[in-house]
């Protein structure tokens, strides 16, 4: 299980500084900032150039803290600190879409298995091995990629992945 970086007190501090509009995914300042750079009602947050996620900042116990907007959106909507918040719409554009309807709380494994969307298969852990003209199955476990074999059908490769999940007690 993924351990959240910050505790409830940090999220509560952010919730007092910002308001959240679940239908648009927009955060706004609740009050003018101390130097009046931002007025109450102004849109808050900035897009991180490294990954396209929106980040909000606030002083908490005298320290400047940054929280990702999608995590704060989840907290402000459901009053719970999420494990991993996944954007349903994928890609860089989807990372700035913080409407609550575009977010879901998932495990780290569920979030990382979304990479199969770009795969040649409709199954997680299965890809087409072009050189061998067969379906390949593999699974990531404890940071290592485990090769499960080559198969004649996509379904056989998917079954090998499912069996590996069961054998590793991950299902």
Image (tube, rainbow, N blue to C red):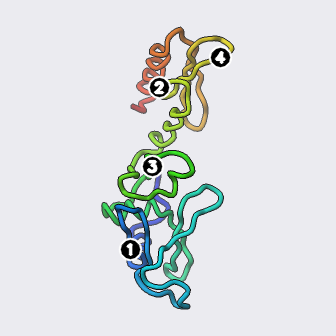
Determine which of the numbered discs, if any, sits on residue 164 in the image: none
Q: Residue at x 47, y 50 (%)?
A: 2
Labels 3 and 4: the sequence-earlier one = 3
Q: Residues within 10 Å of mark 4 (few under 14, many from 20)?
A: few
* Separation of marks 1 and 2 at Cα, in angstroms: 39 Å
Q: Are marks 2 and 4 in contact (CB under 8 Å)?
A: no
Q: Residue at x 49, y 36 (%)?
A: 113
Q: Residues within 10 Å of mark 1 (few under 14, many from 20)?
A: many
* Separation of marks 1 and 3 at Cα, in angstroms: 21 Å
* Separation of marks 1 and 4 at Cα, in angstroms: 50 Å
Above or below, 116 against 52 in this view is: above
Badge nearest the viewer, 3 or 4: 4
Q: Which residue is mark 3?
A: 86
Labels 3 and 2: the sequence-earlier one = 3
Image coordinates for residue 117, horizontal then vertical, percent: 51, 34
Q: Residue at x 47, y 40 (%)?
A: 109
Q: Which residue is mark 1?
A: 19
Labels 1 and 2: the sequence-earlier one = 1
């Amino acid at each position: 299980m993924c351990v959240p970086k910050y505790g409830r007190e940090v999220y509560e501090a952010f919730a007092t500084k910002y308001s959240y509009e679940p239908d648009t995914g927009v955060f706004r300042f609740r009050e003018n900032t101390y130097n009046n750079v931002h007025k109450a009602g102004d849109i808050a947050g900035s897009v991180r150039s490294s990954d396209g996620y929106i980040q909000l900042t606030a002083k908490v116990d005298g320290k400047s803290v940054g929280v990702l907007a999608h995590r704060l959106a989840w907290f402000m909507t459901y009053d719970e600190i999420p494990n991993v918040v996944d954007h349903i719409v994928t890609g860089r554009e989807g990372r700035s879409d913080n409407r609550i309807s575009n977010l879901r709380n998932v495990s780290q494994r569920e979030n990382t298995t979304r990479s199969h969307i770009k795969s040649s298969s409709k199954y997680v852990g299965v890809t087409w091995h072009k050189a061998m003209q067969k379906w390949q199955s593999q699974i990531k476990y404890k940071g290592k990629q485990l090769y499960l074999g080559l198969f004649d059908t996509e379904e056989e490769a998917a079954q090998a992945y499912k069996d590996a999940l069961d054998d590793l007690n991950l299902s």
